[in-house]
Image (cartoon, grey):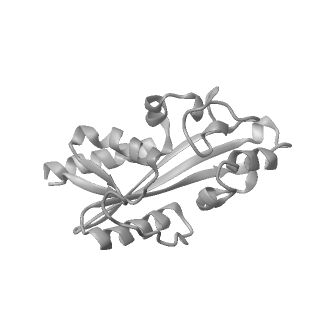
Amino acid sequence: MINKLVMATNNKNKLREARQILSPLGIEVLSQQEAGVDIEPVEDGQTFEENALIKAEAIYNAVKVPVIADDSGLCVDALGGRPSVHSARYAPKGQECDKILTEMKDVPEDKRTAYFECCIVYIDSEGTESMTGKCYGTIAYAQKGTDGFGYDPIFLYGDRTLAEMSPDEKNSISHRGEAMKKLYEYLEKKKGE
């Protein structure tokens, strides 16, 4: 019976989303810090799944309770799929959106397609399971909105950026929301076993 798990992050935004989505299952989600773990594994995988697995295994080995870890990023078609697994380190914090907008200043509207991808890995004593979610959209010409984080202010879903949506709206369509829904279904089934 899973009552508690550790999320391999100290990112308050990711924790808030995970807690919001998993709370109906009665599972307490702890941050690494709350679990007393101060590990920053080197994320040198070539895919989101590899990076999530690196984090999940490192934290699981430290706490020996169920762990979830995610890796996610923005993949921009006009930039050959960049920044992809390098999304968090693509530019200095707070300058990510500016860098993408500068690199795409001459890219026409019909070539501004992009998607967010998130892979969540769950690990416990029985093994691992991974879930992937994607959210397709386009890159805006300017930042809009004050909610969200990271690349949300430049990622258009329909006629609004993710940063212009409420947390509930974003969770219902986002890459992390989709992967979290799959995780929710997996954990719900696991709790019933």
> 64 left or right of 57?
left
Write the residue at 86% across / 43% down: 106
> 157 left or right of 92?
left
Residue 49, x across and y down, in percent: 47, 63
Query: Residue 109: which quarter of the image?
Result: top right
Query: Residue 18: which quarter of the image?
Result: top left
> 33 left or right of 146?
left
Residue 100, x across and y down, in percent: 74, 48
From the viewer's side, name the closer residue of 45 and 6: 6
Write the residue at 57% across / 69% down: 46
Residue 179, x across and y down, in percent: 41, 47
Extreme-top residue of the structure: 159
**Number of marks in picture:** 0
Q: Is residue 147 above or below residue 177?
A: above
Instruction: Locate the N terminus and report the quarter of the image it occupies.
Output: bottom left
Residue 38, x across and y down, in percent: 40, 67
Write the residue at 62% across / 30% down: 145
